[in-house]
């Protein structure tokens, strides 16, 4: 039977979602470990988003085939009991055999939190980037309006050897101001390697007056990673939702 | 000059607020260390509430005499820069020389969070007690109504050698239900050692049907720690506010 899982994690101490060679310190690896023990057989979990080291998830989606008589709730409880305390499963549901969490995803929502004030938030310290500087939000919004839509985002991709298409569609980039904090929400049909973090670093530079909103056009046209801003730290980023 | 500090901390990895002998792993110790370095002289910080190991604070208040030309904001920034990331200073203000954070406090507000659902909240995992069982909130409220007011709370005090008065006044015990969570707010003029955690453990036992709300009367009259319920874990507790 095929299952759809909704997974949440504090990515701080992990090497990202994807299992890689012999490192076991990935979210995927931890989940596979627990499920393999449950069904007494090897399992392979497919995650919708391959989040980087240190990136969090509120609504990661995964699919996995399991040969078990356990109910959805029993699988969910088993996972939450044996997974470490920084990985949680919010939901387990049976899915059609053809469902594949990554290949079937039609879109993803990422959220990036930037602390702009002097306030040191000790309780949320792992979930935002403490920049500690005010940003020009109007300028950032003007830049975001240029970046939204369908473009070749090659300049916003860390993977130099990316041979497939680097064209993606960003449905929206919303920038919300809260007390001492700015939250940027990106919704898109797909994201390149480090794309959200490079977009964020570039928008921060616009907010600091180091780049003009209009310069976004040249960055897009140039198709060169060196034209865009820095890669904002992983800790401020969360995969909020996967759409199907 | 005397200063009033508002301090926040994630108490998870500390041995509580109060500096004790040769252990440096206390919040008070860490703050004194940083301030001593700043003014190049020994300093003693007085905290309003001596929170236990593992207990958090959103609004701890401390007072300290400092011989410095630095402004309030400079002291605040210095502290936030050199304190570990799980201790933050929200405010530094000059205070009258007679101000003493503990002796002048007229009341304190503590908040205790209990997870009652199956949901595993990975992001807030350090700040609530994952009981994972539904509780009878009406019964807990009936018990809380008996406990509120002025009473001898000796049964709710872990310190057997307490020789001073164990009479305290609880202005209110509010019990709020949220999705999968119960939050209990205690406001009182003062609290005995472990009092909030023993009150919480006792209210949880009422919520589980192990004790009747009415039995609170006998616990109060008995003046014996053994009559009350268990000491709820530190992680769910936060010192929310100190009143003057």
Image: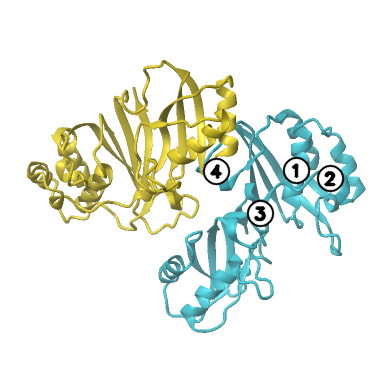
Chain colours: A yellow, B cyan
List the residue tagged with mark 1.
B201
Q: Give coordinates of residue B147: x percent, y percent.
A: 79, 42
- Label 3 – label 4 distance at C-alpha: 35 Å
List the residue tagged with mark 3.
B108
List the residue tagged with mark 2.
B228
Q: Give coordinates of residue A206: x percent, y percent.
A: 19, 51
Helix, strand or loop for disc 1: helix
Which chain hosts label 4?
A
Closer to viewer: mark 4 or mark 1: 4
List the residue tagged with mark 4.
A84
Residue drawn at point x = 52 percent, y = 22 percent: A67
Closer to viewer: mark 3 or mark 2: 2
Helix, strand or loop for disc 4: loop
- Label 1 – label 3 distance at C-alpha: 19 Å
Q: Is residue B178 visible?
A: no
- Label 3 – label 2 distance at C-alpha: 22 Å
Helix, strand or loop for disc 2: loop
Q: Where A28 sits versus B165, above or below?
A: above
- Label 4 – label 1 distance at C-alpha: 26 Å
Which chain hosts label 1?
B
Which of pointers 2 and 1 lies earlier in the amino acid sequence?
A: 1
């Amino acid at each position: 039977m095929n299952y759809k899982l909704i997974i949440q994690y504090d990515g701080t101490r992990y090497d990202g979602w994807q299992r890689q060679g012999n490192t076991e310190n990935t979210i995927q690896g931890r989940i596979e470990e627990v499920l393999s023990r449950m069904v007494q057989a090897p399992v392979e979990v497919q995650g919708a988003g391959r989040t980087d080291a240190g990136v969090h998830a509120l609504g990661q989606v995964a699919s996995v085939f399991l040969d078990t008589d356990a109910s959805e709730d029993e699988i969910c409880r088993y996972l939450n009991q044996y997974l470490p305390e920084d990985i949680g499963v919010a939901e387990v549901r049976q899915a059609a055999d053809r469902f594949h969490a990554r290949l079937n995803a039609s879109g993803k929502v990422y959220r990036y939190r930037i602390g702009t004030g002097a306030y040191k938030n000790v309780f949320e310290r792992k979930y935002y980037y403490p920049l500690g500087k005010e940003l020009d939000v109007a300028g950032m919004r003007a830049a975001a309006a240029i970046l939204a839509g369908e473009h070749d985002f090659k300049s916003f991709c860390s993977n130099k050897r990316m041979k497939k298409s680097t064209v993606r569609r960003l449905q929206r980039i919303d920038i919300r101001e809260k007390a001492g904090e700015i939250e940027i929400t990106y919704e898109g049909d797909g994201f390149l390697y480090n794309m959200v973090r490079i977009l964020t670093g570039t928008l921060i530079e616009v907010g600091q007056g180091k780049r003009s909103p209009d310069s976004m056009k040249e960055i897009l046209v140039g198709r060169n990673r060196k034209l865009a801003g820095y890669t904002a730290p992983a800790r401020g980023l969360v995969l909020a939702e996967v759409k199907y």
